[in-house]
Image (cartoon, rainbow, N blue to C red):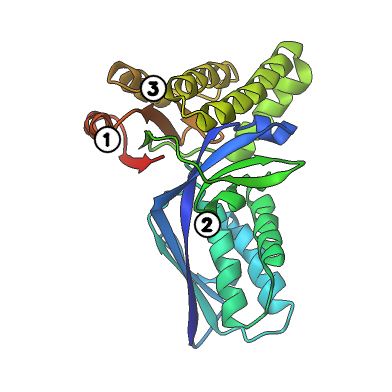
Amino acid sequence: MQAEFATHGKAILIGEHSVVYGYNALCMPLKELTLTTTVAAQDEGPSLFTNNYHGLFSQAPEEYNGLHFLVDGLILDQHLPEKVSLNYEGEIPMERGLGSSAAVALGTVRAINSYYSLDMDEHDIVTWANKAENITHGSASGLDVATVKSDHLVSFNKTDGPQEITSELGAYLVISDTGQLGSTKTAVSQVREQVSTSAEKKSSMDRLGDLADTAIDAWGSHDINQLGAVFNRAQEILTNFSLSTRAIDRINHMALEEGAVGSKLSGSGLGGVVISLVRDSKTAQLLRQSLRAVARNVWIEAI
């Protein structure tokens, strides 16, 4: 007996950090990056099987506290059969801003719901997944979970929640993994301190928030140049918050030199990935070949 669910990754286009302060953000599902969660009966448990840990949940390291919360709340506290394993297989690198923890949380809730026939509705599933995300990241906006469950671009703010944008831009996104682990908790805390103590940084955050609105307009009018300009300006602001790294800067520079109309870090920063906007598939393929020399991995997503 088992239940299995597949989810995918995400990349934030614009609005990282400013979404925490109530502004819009745009986030893109990455369907090439997938994660499959399987809940299956076994002789002991509950147990966890990931690329980094195989064993009982009771002995799992702190980084799995979000999953601990889900197993405790949905299985143990409900006195359901404990002899199960949770297995994760996929291609979403961890701690890169690619939505791995959100994909894990959502896939886990869906798989547990199916395995135990809990009959949770979509609202309950998303609520549980976001609670797990809050434990993992300290304070999660809800954007990641909304995007890893969507097949379309997601516009999000704290007031209106997630809104799908079904139109396409007609361009390509080249996603480069720096190989550096990011830390959302550290980055969010670092930015919060700057915003709370500096009027200049508060103004910068406001400008970052305004750029998300410009990006939404650019997407709607299929204006690739304008969206590229938004990427570049956002990168300047994020760098001013000390969120960029030498690896990010190097990839951005190379991307712009070799045909990208805009390039920026994606996610919390301090590591993670870079997203570069290009007009056509040929340019995307050529850029990927070049960036493989300086990035751990490179993907292309049609947008």
| Rendered residue at 71%/63% (across/down) | 123
- Which of the two residues, 32 or 109, is positioned nearer the viewer here? 32
Look at label 2 and name its amino acid: Ala
Look at label 1 and name its amino acid: Ser
Q: Which residue is mark 3?
A: 252
Total label count? 3
Cα–Cα gap, marks 2 and 1: 28 Å
Secondary element type, mark 2: helix
What crowding class fits label 1: few (fewer than 14 Cα within 10 Å), some (14-19), or many (20 or more)? some
Depicted 224 relative to depicted 27: above or below: above
Secondary element type, mark 3: helix
| Rendered residue at 49%/88% (across/down) | 43
Cα–Cα gap, marks 3 and 1: 19 Å
Rendered location of residue 61, percent (x, y): 56, 59
> Foreground mark, 3 or 1?
1
Disc 2 to disc 3: CB gap under 8 Å: no
Comes first in the chain, label 2 or label 1: 2
Q: Is residue 210 left or right of residue 283?
A: right
Q: Which residue is mark 2?
A: 103
Rendered location of residue 262, percent (x, y): 42, 22
Depicted 251 relative to depicted 158: above or below: above
- Which of the two residues, 128 or 242, is positioned nearer the viewer here? 128
Q: Which residue is mark 1?
A: 281
- Disc number at residue 181? none
Cα–Cα gap, marks 2 and 3: 27 Å
- Which of the two residues, 214 or 258, is positioned nearer the viewer here? 214
Comes first in the chain, label 3 or label 1: 3
Residue 207 occupies which quadrant of the picture?
top right
Would you say residue 243 is visible in this rendering? yes
Depicted 6 relative to depicted 210: above or below: below
